[in-house]
């Protein structure tokens, strides 16, 4: 139960951080390009890559706290970081075909699903 609580708290912190950074970047640079999302996704990937292995190999922390940070905090901040980490783990495991399929399917099916959602919303 504590893990779920940790993920919920971490998620709330991650979501608030995402919102705050989005507001700041959009105030500074405008909205003509999704710079805020790009920055957040890249930051999330950097943090996920670093913290995933740092807390696995070098720093011993409570598993609940680790899950709260990685799944909750970074998951709330950006799910793109999880996508990137899962892709890296597949590659490291030698599952190049699965990694390629996961990358391609995630991008193309994600875009296709978004287009279907837009179509449905506009044609209700």
Image (spheres, grey):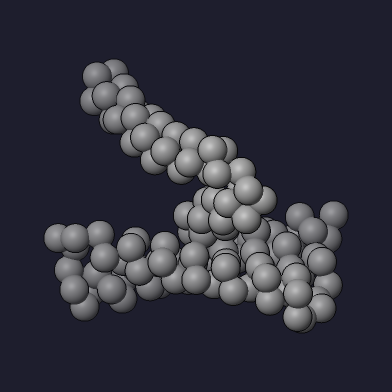
Any part of residue 67 in sight: yes
- Image x and y of residue 112, in percent: 34, 30
Tell which of 26 and 64 is nearer to you: 64
Any part of residue 76 in sight: no
Name the residue: 80% across, 65% down: 64
Tell which of 122 and 75 is nearer to you: 75
- Image x and y of residue 108, in percent: 36, 35
State left or right for residue 69 relative to residue 29: right
Query: Which of the image's four quarters has the C terminus?
Result: top left
State left or right for residue 36 relative to residue 101: left
Query: Which of the image's four quarters has the N terminus?
Result: bottom right
Q: Residue furthest bottom?
A: 59
The answer to whether residue 120 is above or below residue 8 is: above
State left or right for residue 59 relative to residue 87: right
Name the residue: 56% across, 38% down: 98
State left or right for residue 52 relative to residue 88: right
Residue 35 quadrant = bottom left
- Image x and y of residue 73, in percent: 60, 66
The answer to whether residue 124 is above or below residue 102 is: above
Name the residue: 33% across, 25% down: 116
Residue 114 quadrant = top left
Name the residue: 40% across, 32% down: 109
The answer to whether residue 63 is above or below residue 84 is: below
């Amino acid at each position: 139960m504590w893990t779920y609580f940790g993920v919920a708290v971490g998620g709330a912190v991650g979501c608030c951080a995402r919102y705050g950074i989005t507001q700041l970047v959009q105030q500074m640079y405008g909205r003509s390009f999704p710079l805020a999302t790009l920055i957040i996704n890249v930051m999330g990937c950097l943090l996920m890559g670093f913290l995933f292995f740092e807390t696995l190999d070098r720093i011993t922390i409570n598993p609940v706290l680790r899950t709260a940070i990685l799944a909750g905090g970074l998951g709330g901040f950006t799910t793109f970081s999880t996508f990137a980490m899962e892709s890296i783990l597949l590659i490291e495991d030698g599952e190049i075909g699965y990694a390629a399929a996961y990358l391609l399917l995630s991008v193309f099916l994600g875009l296709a699903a978004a287009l279907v959602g837009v179509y449905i919303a506009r044609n209700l």
